[in-house]
Amino acid sequence: MAGFRIGRGRDNNRSPQQPPQQQQSYGQQQQPPPYGRPPYPPVGGPPPQQQWPQPGPGGHGEPEYFDPYGQQQPHAQQPPHGHGGHGGGGGYNDNPGHTQVFAVGEDPYGQGATYQAGAASAAPSGPRLPWKELLRGIVTRPGQTFLQMRDYAVWGPALIVTFLYGLLAVFGLDDAREDVIKATVPKAIPIVLSAGVAFVICGLILGAVTHTLARQLGGDGSWQPTVGLSMLVMSITDAPRLLFAVFLGGDNMVVQVLGWATWVAAGALFTSLVSKSHDLPWPKALGASAIQLVALLSIIKLGTI
């Protein structure tokens, strides 16, 4: 019939602008989507369920700053700092993979101040003692006195007491005592005065040695209180022996016993002094004052004992 023409492989009902549909052959794989975007749904099928990484029961999963698909998951409200953050696992900030923010200058772990040798103490342990209470306190309550005076220089009482001790110490030594008694007054005065100055210099040197050893062993005390108090301890502890030696002589048995007893007392006071002034245990404090004790025994006491 005229007017109808049957074409082969053509569809007369389709417009010429519409491209032919391509059918996916069996076994053909769909191209994977670029990273960070969900895949396109396949033709003629429902969209696949997208699997997002979820944290485990204990909050263990991907870190909060790691979002592979560009979409941040909503989280529970973060508890304030200090409520469950350091406890038994209830805080969000302490979960593995998460960050925690602290304020400037905040110390969340409460670390105490570390010990630093040589650092000055925060505040004095008490008010400065007058010289009478200072001398009385060294004998009656040495530990409290040394602790209270560890931040104060005591040059005035130390120099005066040590100088007076040196003036009388000449009469406690047998050889020096004979020389002073036999000498005339103009010659005896320089001998006595030089002995006082020599004892002051000796006390300064021995106190400085004790302070240096204490600092080497980890002490943190100041040198002026240590040297001044050590001079007072040296003079006060030897005063009982000296009083008897002036009248009885150095070879007397009572003087010798007092010499050893006062030397042991000096060792105890030096140990307490260094321990309180430098924050050291007593073995180190005794070791720091050992040179001064040996020097006092050999220079002052062995001459009479």
Image (spheres, grey):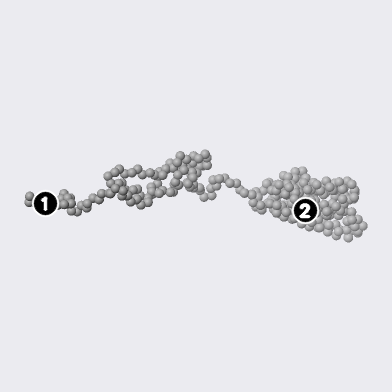
- The label shown at residue 291 is 2
Q: Residue at x 79, y 56 (%)?
A: 202
Secondary element under disc 1, as helix, strand or loop, is loop
- The label shown at residue 43 is none
Q: Tell me where residue 301 appears, x and y as whole percent.
A: 84, 51
- Label 1 sits on what residue type? Arg
- The label shown at residue 5 is 1
User: 8 left or right of 213?
Assistant: left
How busy is the neighbourhood of tag 1: few (under 14 within 10 Å), some, or many (20 plus)?
few
User: Given this view, does label 2 or label 1 mark the residue nearer the observer?
Assistant: 1
Q: Residue at x 50, y 42 (%)?
A: 85
- Label 2 sits on what residue type? Ile
User: 226 left or right of 48?
Assistant: right
Q: Nearer the viewer, residue 154 or 82?
A: 82
Q: Can residue 28 be seen in this snapshot? A: yes
Q: Can residue 135 be seen in this snapshot? A: no
Q: CA distance from mark 2 to mark 1?
A: 131 Å
Q: Residue at x 77, y 43 (%)?
A: 140
Q: Tell me where residue 59 appears, x and y as whole percent.
A: 46, 42
Q: Tell me where residue 93 appears, x and y as whole percent.
A: 48, 44
Q: Nearer the viewer, residue 295 or 5?
A: 5
Residue 258 vertical placement versus 206 (above, below): above
User: 70 left or right of 270?
Assistant: left
